[in-house]
Image (tube, rainbow, N blue to C red):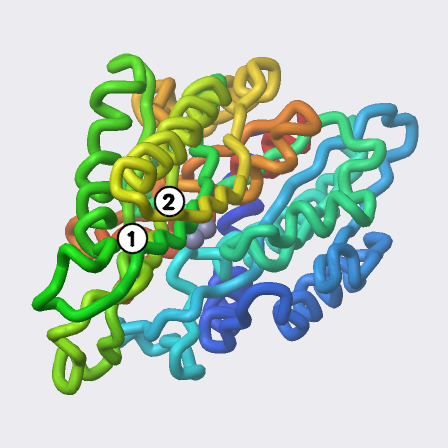
Amino acid sequence: MKNLIFEQCHHHFNDIVAIRRDIHQHPEIGFDVERTAGIAADALDALGISVKTGIGRTGVVGDMEVPGASKRIALRADMDALPIQELTDVPYKSRIDGKAHLCGHDAHTAMLIGTARILSHLRSSLKTHIRFVFQPSEEVFPGGAEAMMADGVLEDVDEIYGIHVFPIYAVGEYATCVGPMLAQSDTFRITLTGRGGHAAFPHLTIDPILIGAQYVTAVQSIVARNVDPLDSAVVSVTQLHGGDANLQNGLAGAALNVIPPKVLIGGTVRTLQKTVQIRVREQLERLIAGLANANDATYTFDYQEGCPVTYNHEPCVTNVVSNARELVGKEKLIFPVLPILGGEDFGCYSQEIPACFVMVGAGNKEQGIVNMCHHPQFDIDENCMIYGMALLVSLAMR
Ligand SMILES: [Zn+2]
Ligand SMILES: [Zn+2]
């Protein structure tokens, strides 16, 4: 079986590279992925697979029905690019300024098209129905997964699998684990209001800059002193605004003799367990409440839950592990990989039905392909697509 699968992956490889490069040159953002979705829908249609478009606004769903099968598995690819300028000099570089496939979703889409072609060819050996899911807007939450679920993408699906190219690992390697693999990714926004005034008369003001600075320092203690050292969490303050400076011009022209009336603070929280998330959230608010109270200031605290944890269910992981071992051998399967605190909206599916997410090695140190996802010079060793397709095909053929 292994030889047959790799033979098929190699047979389709050049076409899949061409599709990936075409999508790479024409990146689309968020839900605006009509061109990419059209490529996926046409590819499925050409195989005689029943296709539905406009699922979750611009998503595409293809159902391959297998006579006599009772179970259905879904294979998911995301299609959206990022609003970042690509800084590579590859011949298939993005043709659109300020947009680029720097998370590898072009490769995910191309690999799922390749998988559909291979499974069409091997259809007589299939034992389960296969649903091909091409999802928009993975990078922006609430995104494509929620929208597609609202349109019924998981109806009648028993298990769902997703893969992500990951240049930290070499081509030919896979990585996964049981349980939480990627983080719950939340955001918080605070408006801290004091009383502005003349900087030479600070005693007549309530200085929100000083309170804001104390808050930023205080939240550093949350992970260190409120989270069990054996659990994981990240709290990062990523925005701190006060005064009237024009951020583009720096402090030129800013009123440096005025204490402003308010500051805005924002950031992100990443956790792997609900209990930790609740603890961090409570402490974030408790600290701002305490500091505001101690200084006679007021505040608003807004906490938005984002992408839930990507949770790998044991029976699905067992399938991945046995297939991956057969395809590349035990030593090239990184299992169990440690969870990472990045977010992925595949987590939405994994909260609903049994699921497994797998990192597919896409790095190549000799060729300098080492930059991580979202780096302006991110790229993949395209040979990784053989391994991505091989894993998806093997999961579908159980
Ligand atoms: Zn990304
Ligand atoms: Zn991604």
Q: CA distance from mark 2 to mark 1?
A: 7 Å
Report whether the residue tagged 1 is closer than 8 Å to ligand 1: no
Give the residue displayed 72% in from the left and 40% down from the top.
122
Q: Residue at x 26, y 26 (%)?
A: 223
Badge 2 vs badge 1, beta-carbon distance below 8 Å? yes
* Residue 198 visible to an observer of this rendering: yes
Q: Amino acid at mark 1?
A: Thr
**Side of 340 where 11 appears, left or right:** right
Q: Which residue is mark 2?
A: 268
- Residue that carries the numbered disc 1 in the rendered image: 238
Where residue 27 appears, x then y in whole percent?
A: 50, 72
**Looking at the image, which is closer to me, 236 or 342?**
236
Asked if ligand 1 lies within 8 A of label 2, the reply is no
In the rendered view, tell whether residue 314 sits above or below residue 57: above
**Front-most of residues 29 and 140:** 140
The percent position of residue 169, horizontal first and vertical second, equals: 29, 39
In-front residue for pair 347/206: 206
x, y (%) of residue 307?
53, 41
The image quarter in which residue 246 lies = bottom left
Decide: few, some or many residues near mark 2? Use Cα within 10 Å; few <14, some 14-19, many ≥20: some
Q: In this rendering, is residue 13 above or below 164?
A: below
| Amino acid found under the numbered disc labelled 2 | Thr
**Which quadrant: the N terminus?**
top right
The residue carrying pointer 1 sits among few (fewer than 14), some (14 to 19) or many (20 or more) residues within 10 Å by Cα, namely few
Check the image and report above or below for 285 versus 249: above
Left or right: 396 with respect to 275? right
Q: Dividing the image into 4 quarters, which one contains the C terminus? A: top right
